[in-house]
Image (cartoon, rainbow, N blue to C red):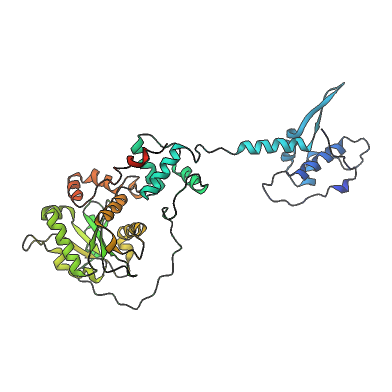
Amino acid sequence: MEHLNYITSTNTIQPITTRKFFNHLSKTDRQNIERLLRLRNDPNYNGPKITLAYIASQTGFNKSTISREIKRGTFQSGFNASGPIKNYAWDVGQRIAKERSNSSHQKTKLTSNSLEIKRLAAIINHEHISPEDAIDKYEQFFHTKFPVCLKTVYKYIRKKLLVVRKGILRFYDVRKKPKTSNTIKSLQKGDNISKRPIEAENRLIIGHWEGDTVYSPRNGGKECLLTLVDRRSRLLLAFKLPDRTATSVVNKFNEIENKIGTENFVKLFSTITFDNGGEFSKVFEMEKSSLLENAQRIKTYFANAYHSWERGSNENANGWIRYYFPKGTAFTNVSERKLLHKINKINFAKRNILNGISAVELFKQEKPELLNIIEQLGITNPYQNMGTYLNNII
């Protein structure tokens, strides 16, 4: 093994007084350590005593680091009368440090060619859902736990081991400065949100809803969506409207009542809280039953103007709808079947706010007697046909 010739002059090694924390020893650092150790053993050397502390002061590292490096790079070069001869060599320390560094990087449990990764990627890309929901659907379909956790799955996505099509992961843009408007909201036609019952305010029971409309003003046509979200379970219902008018909203409530019956309508909808949009101005017509004379089918309340957080569940649900139907979508071209399919994906998605279960699961736990009613409105499992593409992945 070749070694560099050392120079006895102590001026060849400049002491380093400051050094960034957590730096590793470099090739030059190790060469300086070797030179200083050779000087210590040189009988002609008359300079300062070379100790671990001195070497540390000359290289800028802690003396414990120097001690460990000397042990790492020391090898047996021969024997003499006293026993084995041991010396430090910079290249030995460099090689061992590199080997340890390479072995310290943990290999990924799964690779891009792993069957589990292929299946999970297929679920995410085909169903257009989040990795968390995809893992849940994977475990339900294959009746086995996914080999790695959600955090690791996101690491695989960042490393491109799991390829997700652009636009599927729901990233949020930086919030834009809200536009100022001089438009004065119309006066509330009904009771203020402050009069809402305590069970609605505190999300105590299922049956208290929030309502809004989703539309596309940019050449998207007149058709829009009426969205209703249960405050307790976060179950989402969405219905197409021909236009964004109060008459269309009333007609849609009449249609729902005709479909499920007045008794079921009253069981499902106790109250609904709207914003102050003009499409919700016909309060009496919305609250009055279309099948039973002089009967009330629902009680409506209205949030304060410019207080969107008072209907936070509905705003969040509208964000999910925009995930599947971005602004500019012409709802005229969206079929009822496609709309229900996307709404069901939202309702069957696991929610952290619901302790890891979906809105439908919470509905089943607390109001199983209402399941038949929401099924009549199109709430069904959208993942029943996953086998058509998963069974072909090998």
Q: Residue 340 at what x, y percent from top left?
A: 26, 53
Q: Residue 337 at what x, y percent from top left?
A: 25, 53
Query: Outermost residue toward the front?
Result: 392
Q: Residue 138 at what x, y percent from top left?
A: 37, 40
**Residue 92 seen in render:** yes
Describe residue 198's horizontal placement relative to residue 24 as left or right.
Answer: left
Query: Which of the two residues, 341 or 314, is positioned nearer the viewer here?
Result: 341
Query: Outermost residue toward the right?
Result: 44
- Say how many tags the image has: 0
Describe residue 60's horizontal placement relative to residue 381 as left or right.
Answer: right
Q: Residue 12 at what x, y percent from top left?
A: 86, 48
Against 128, residue 145 (above or below) is: above
Query: Outermost residue toward the bottom?
Result: 182
Against 304, residue 379 (above or below) is: above
**Residue 276, located in which quarter of the rendered image?**
bottom left
**Quadrant position of the N terminus in the picture:** top right
Against 351, residue 394 (above or below) is: above
Query: Outermost residue toward the left?
Result: 293
**Quadrant position of the C terminus in the picture:** top left
**Residue 103, located in which quarter of the rendered image?**
top right
Residue at 28% over, 61% down: 333
**Residue 231 seen in render:** no
Against 271, residue 367 (above or below) is: above
